[in-house]
Amino acid sequence: MGPTYWWMLFGMALVTYIPRMIPLTILDGKELPPIISGVLSNIPYAVLGALIFPAVLFVQEGNILFGIIGAATAFLIAFLGGTLMPVVLGTIGVLAIYSLFM
């Protein structure tokens, strides 16, 4: 392992540490305005959606309908009040039945 490796490792550590350290030091003990707090609280859901949506379209090669049916089923069960396990098991069940008729 040459010096390039260590500089790269140091750089990655610094780039990861700075965005985590700044809010802890600058915002320590301060209250954020409600609108900023609302936006920040919704970021994880937006990122999760951005990560999942492309995978839904390519879950089964050559059959985009498979992913769309699975996503629609999961959304419907969650919308009707299902928690994590009913959503997962219900979606697996619907896609298992769908795959029998494909």
Image (cartoon, rainbow, N blue to C red):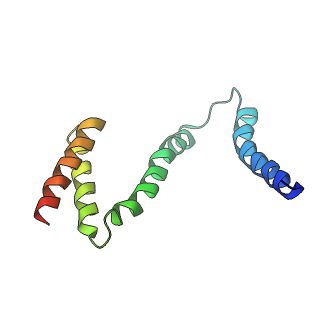
Q: Is residue 99 at all visible to an observer of this figure?
A: yes
* Of residues 53 and 59, the one drawn nearer to the viewer in this rendering: 59
Provide residue 37's location: percent of width, then percent of height. Answer: 55, 39
* Residue 19 position by quadrant: top right
Where does residue 14 sit, x and y in percent of width and height?
79, 46
Total count of labels:
0
Q: Is residue 41 left or right of residue 77?
A: right
The correct choice, above or below, for 92 with respect to 84 in the image is below
Specify whether 46 is left or right of 76.
right
Q: Is residue 45 left or right of residue 98?
A: right
Q: Quadrant of the C terminus?
A: bottom left
Residue pushed farthest front? Answer: 1
| Residue in the picture at 39% in, 61% down | 55
Q: Position of residue 52 (x, y in %)?
A: 41, 55
Vertical side of 97 occupied by 17: above or below: above
- Percent position (x, y) of residue 36? 57, 43
